[in-house]
Amino acid sequence: MSRIRPFLCAVAALFALTTLAQAETVYHRGNAGDPKTLDAHQTSIDVEANILWDLLEGLVAYDAAGKVVPGAAESWTMSQDGTVYTFKLRADGKWSNGDPVKASDFVFSFRRIMDPQTAAKYASLHYPIRNAEKINKYEMKPEELGVKAVDDLTLEIALERPTPYFLELLTHQTALPMHQASVEKFGKDFVRPGNFVSNGAYSLAENVPGDHIKVVKNPHYWDAANVKVDVVMFYPTEDNAAAVRRFMARELDTNYQFPIDQLPFLKEKLGGQVKTSPYLAIEYYAINNKKEPFSDPRVRRALAMAIDRDFLADKIWSGAAVPAYSLVPPGINGYTPAEAEFAALSQLDREDEAKKLIEEAGYGPGGKPLKIEIRYNTNDAHKKVATAIADMWKQVFGAEVTLLNTDIKTHYAHLQNRGDFDVARAGWVGDYADAQNFLYLGVTGNAVGNYSQFSNAKFDELVKTSDATLDPAERAKIMAEAEAILLAEMGLIPILNRTSLHLVSDKVKGWADNVRNVHRSRYISIER
Amino acid sequence: MLTYTLRRLLSAAPTLFVIVTVAFFLVRFAPGGPFDLEQPLAPQVLDNLRRAYSLDQPLHVQYLDYLGKLVRGDFGPSYVAIDFTVGEMLRRALPYSVTLGLSALALAIFGGVAAGVFAALRQNSAADYSVMTVATVGVTVPNFVVAPVLQLVFGLMLGLLPIGGWGDGGLAHRLMPTVALALPQMAVIARLTRSSMIEALRADHIRTLRASGLPGHVIIRHALKGALLPVISYLGPAAAALVTGSVVIEKIFAIPGIGAYFVEGALNRDYTLVMGTVVTLAGFVVVFNLLVDLAYAALDPRVRYD
């Protein structure tokens, strides 16, 4: 009997522990990688945004469906000329340590990201704010930034020029606020658990790089009553094939990213728990507009037409991507992308047309030989796509195509430093939901992002006009006109729109697919 | 013995210096830098960053600066994981890799030596062939195949073990990665032990022991002492590799060790992280090689260090 008692006690204790644990809802979230940092001003990728959007809340935020809604600000007004925004902060807005969220916190944050000493990688995103660019280039002091606190709850942001997409810009993780007192007190270490003060639905509890980041519900959050998950565990599931097994063993409730070649198998096995949804991501081939024969628009159009995008989307991406005939991905509110004129033709007709164009340009069978080198960054899907496209160009006009792959750093350094190339794979994921963010890739002055070196005066003019046009419908029309020019000239070759890839357990409620690919844990609930 | 150890440790300093110097310049010659991203940076932002990390200084200044800090034990900040210094990252991650590596090493040595001796004693029998076949398979099947198969069978189908994560660091979380990490080493050790054991069993002094009618286990003990020498010399670099983590195993089982830093550092051009991993690995190789030489002296009476 005496031997049994400790055993019984242990069982009872264990039972009590598990019941306690059940009282708390834990969301196990596979996040595809580790953040490089939790300092919002130094981040740039989705993996970081997923965590930061749980910890912090900007003036505006995303709802479950990816729509812009009031965040730390409950309302705002825009001046007649579109250059001054006035935000009214929530009176009940609080930081996780109980401090009120003040307009001065936002002033501090915007000054910090523009300060060249911060060396923020994404500072240029906020150049529309008055004096921001000059401050970032050491030409003015951070105190001269056009962001000011009128009183504790009123924030005024003055802009350099009307910026119709400014509210979209404010959703970006680099526009999230920082708690001035703790950043000043801890310096670089303000991001550590224990130091990190947040104003979002969650606060930071643990950060073990490579293992997990634990965030717990913030009782001071203004909408805490509607936050259902108590603890979110973010796991850096970099090996996405292993993450799929963890998901299937129910160790994860959701997981971001899975191997695309497993898509058919996963759909069969997991059904509706596999979520693929188009988002603001374009795969395109940059084509050297400054180099013979690609400087000839006919050659560029022919190459674009000869690509069988349905084959690439269905066979190589297994349906995890859809054919793209425009630069701006579909799904941006109020904007209908222009399409390349050949989109309406069948693939066979496109190929016939492509042959004619190449012949006119004096290349291909009977003309000068067409030699093309495709550069891509080392990646299984990119390799398969490049191989298939090389084959298509060979088939249609007997081009001699060679492939060259380098690792991602080398690849982009080569393009950004204007190294010699013919055709190169590139991708772009929208920072905010506005067509301008994509059209910018074709603007002449874009020293680093316009890999093709496309240059068209009319296009530049239209983009510039659209930036100053406040009427949304009128502005959309102008941008679509600009996009049509880029596509008619085929300044770069759109290939595919990627879809976001998530595994979402059927126990998880409140998940909504959206083009921004934003999924804040505060809208999630879990049925155990 | 003590003087020898000290001398060896001292002579490691120039070796490490050469390794650090070569690595420092090699990694700088790789095209691209830590700030070349898929989404390009505006030129002035890049300038700010380069200034913040002193990358705008001439290379030799950066080199001397790095050496100076390294001597004081400062590995510098990580260019990519900026919330932590490289020293912190290594200190935090190393215990996971070392724990895993040492358990795998123990498993590999005990399993491998036992299998090797077992096979050697039954040379050319069915038992010998089956052990050696398993060992050959162990060497040839890469661990990125073994690991997912273990996960599928024990995690997903049988539901006995957690598939990934370190959890509380308990045996359940450690079992599969340890086995996956140990298997290839175990196979090599089994093969080495078998062949040297067969040789040792034929040696003159063993024949003498046998002739004097000593019991079997005593004979095995004496033979094993000699047979272990090749295994020991193999163990130096193998142990260094095991305790500095395997990127494949750590990625598949989601273990926060330093294995991943070797690859991530290089791919991200995180210069300081690359240097940190190189110094760590070099340090372990020096230490384990020394341990191997000391073990030699303990096992082989002909080896003396004075």
Image (cartoon, coloured by chain):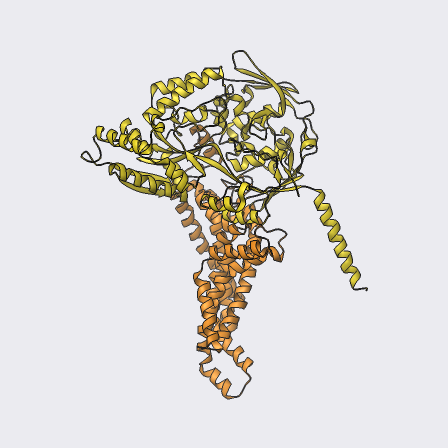
Query: Residue furthest toward the left?
Result: A366
* Residue B233, placed above or below residue B28: below
Q: Position of residue A341 (x, y in %)?
A: 34, 25
Q: Position of residue A387 (x, y in %)?
A: 34, 42
* Residue B40, placed above or below residue B111: above
Query: Residue furthest toward the top?
Result: A80
Query: Is residue A38 found left or right of A389 in the rendered image?
Result: right
Residue A389 sits in which quadrant? top left
Q: Residue at x 60, y 55 (%)?
A: B159
Chain corresponding to orange in the figure: B
Residue A212 sits in which quadrant? top right
Is any part of residue A490 visible from this angle?
A: yes
Query: Residue furthest toward the bottom?
Result: B212
Chain corresponding to yellow in the figure: A
Is any part of residue B56 visible from this angle?
A: no
Residue A227 or residue A272, whichever sits in front: A272
Q: Position of residue A247 (x, y in %)?
A: 56, 46
Q: Quadrant of the N terminus of chain A?
A: bottom right
Query: Residue furthest toward the right?
Result: A1
Residue B42 or residue A257, whichever sits in front: A257
Q: Quadrant of the C terminus of chain A?
A: top right
